[in-house]
Image: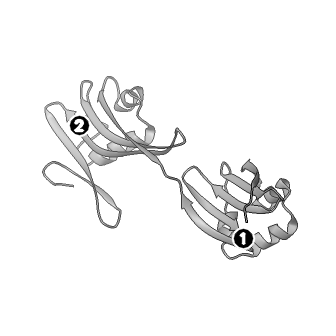
Amino acid sequence: MFEVEGAIQVFEVEKNDTLLNLLKRSGIKDAYIRALIKTSGSEKLAQIKVGDILEIKNSVNGEPKKFLTSNELDGIKATYKNGFYYKKFSRPLEKLERFASVTIENSLYESALSAGLSDSLIMDLIYIFGWDIDFIFDIRPGDKFDVLYEDYYWNGKQVKNADIKAARFLRGNKVFTAIRYYYEDGSKEYFSLMGKT
């Protein structure tokens, strides 16, 4: 049977919103709301937070076809076809590789921010080199660092903090290097050119 989709309603979750009051506000019949809530897995759909998005897609006769709750990265989808079925999903992200070369003028933090690096990327850089460099006492104006990192986007908007692929820090005449390596279990570690962690 060919079905034409009707309206798509989109709600951004605000303070004190619950899945139940959003469904009622959308005009969905109580019978569908009860069926949705009674289905195993509905607790995952109900775990919404402020800023999350709830999308409701209906057929032209008003029967709900699909519910999506999501933040910008992933979510839960409930599909109706003689009952509800739940499935987790992740959005396909666009990964952009970026490079920054920064010369420290007054402070590492201010210089990195001026170069367009995020707070989290700066903190990751400090963590990676924290065993070799005392960032409170050792950093001087004129020290430099280069960082190759990945930003993640969805629909043209950055949705995930940068992940450092490789970095090099030049402090005086000393050079420190870190290259990312992923293990089979998905954990990562950074190694120097000599293979030290």
- Quadrant (top left/top right/bottom left/bottom right) for the N terminus: bottom right
- Quadrant (top left/top right/bottom left/bottom right) for the C terminus: bottom left
Q: In the rendered structure, which amino acid carries the disc numbered 1?
A: Lys
Crowding at dot 1, Cα within 10 Å, few <14 / some 14-19 / many 20+, comes out as few
- Which residue is located at x 74 percent, y 50 percent? 8
- Which residue is located at x 87 percent, y 67 percent? 30
The percent position of residue 34, horizontal first and vertical second, equals 81, 71
Q: In the rendered structure, which amino acid carries the disc numbered 2?
A: Phe
Crowding at dot 2, Cα within 10 Å, few <14 / some 14-19 / many 20+, comes out as many
Q: How is the image coloured?
A: one colour
Q: In the image, is residue 85 above or below residue 7?
A: below
Query: Which quadrant of the view contains residue 142?
Result: top left
The percent position of residue 69, horizontal first and vertical second, equals 66, 57
Q: In the image, is residue 97 above or below residue 84?
A: above
Image side of residue 88 versus residue 50, left or right:
left
Label 1 close to label 2 by CB (< 8 Å): no
Image side of residue 33 versus residue 77, left or right:
right
Is residue 14 in view from this perspective?
Answer: no
The percent position of residue 35, horizontal first and vertical second, equals 78, 73
Image side of residue 97 versus residue 1, left or right:
left
Q: In the image, is residue 137 above or below residue 52?
A: above
Considering the numbered disc 1 on the image, is that residue within a helix, a strand or a loop? loop
Please tell me whether mark 1 or mark 2 is closer to you in this view: 1
Q: Nearer the viewer, residue 173 or 158?
A: 158
Dot 2 corresponds to which residue? 169
Is residue 114 in view from this perspective?
Answer: yes
Dot 1 corresponds to which residue? 81
